[in-house]
Image (tube, grey):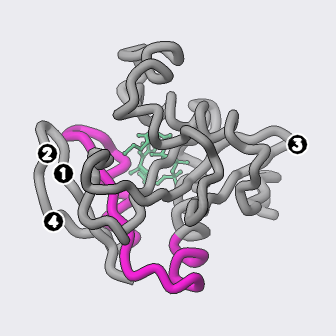
Amino acid sequence: MRADGVLLRDATADDGRALTEALYSAVNWQGTVRLTRDDIAADPRLSHYVAGWPRPGDLGVVAVSGGEPVGAAWCRTFPPGDPGYGFVAEDVPEVSMGVVPARRGQGTGTALLDGLVTRARARGTRALSLSVEDGNRARVLYERAGFVVVGRSGDSDVMLLDL
Ligand SMILES: CC(C)(COP(=O)(O)OP(=O)(O)OC[C@H]1O[C@@H](n2cnc3c(N)ncnc32)[C@H](O)[C@@H]1OP(=O)(O)O)[C@@H](O)C(=O)NCCC(=O)NCCS
């Protein structure tokens, strides 16, 4: 547990809701509601990041404070016919993450990403990818963790961390 009372644990089958909230944060990273929870649920290109959680191969970490989830980072692979926005290869899981607004900027995101990378490496995953939109300060977090830009999709960069 960290000094601010945030605890990190493995994501379980009961964390679908926590991940769905984190996905909502990630989609609306600019702070305005670009897409509602219903919009996200209705768009398979977004809902496939959490649909059916957990699927075989899924891996995730949840940050908890006072017994409540305050953030999550997880990764999932996608087939080429149903790629994520950060798709690189079928065997490279794509990372998603989000922290509740009140908890941002206090190290939780860094701890979550570190926790996910450590777990993925221990499992023998060869690399992790992600997609980050222009202007999102999350890019700093990813660069610090060692992710490098390997592609471009719309107004987002695709980043890769070789494990
Ligand atoms: C990105 C996010 C998960 C990082 O979590 P966090 O707990 O704020 O991360 P940390 O406190 O460890 O901060 C690490 C860095 O993230 C960056 N950052 C990104 N968004 C930030 C925010 N809203 N507030 C503060 N820092 C933010 C900063 O560069 C920070 O480094 P610094 O403190 O040296 O300036 C979180 O800000 C968030 O949920 N943002 C909205 C959703 C999102 O963008 N998800 C990723 C989509 S690709």
Q: Residues within 10 Å of mark 2 (few under 14, many from 20)?
A: few
Residue 92: image tag: none
Residue 157: image tag: 1
Q: CA distance from mark 2 to mark 4?
A: 10 Å
Question: In the image, is residue 95 part of the stretch drawn in magenta?
Answer: no
**In the picture shown, does residue 132 fall above or below 31?**
below
| Mark sitting earlier along the chain (1/4) | 4
Residue type, label 3: Gly
Q: Hey, which residue is sitting farthest right in the picture?
A: 67
> What residue sits right under mark 3 in the picture?
67
Q: Residues within 10 Å of mark 1 (few under 14, many from 20)?
A: many
Q: Quadrant of residue 65?
A: top right
Query: Which one is in front, 77 or 145?
Result: 77
Residue at 69% x, 52% y is 62
Contact, CB < 8 Å: mark 2 with mark 1?
yes
Q: Residues within 10 Å of mark 3 (few under 14, many from 20)?
A: few
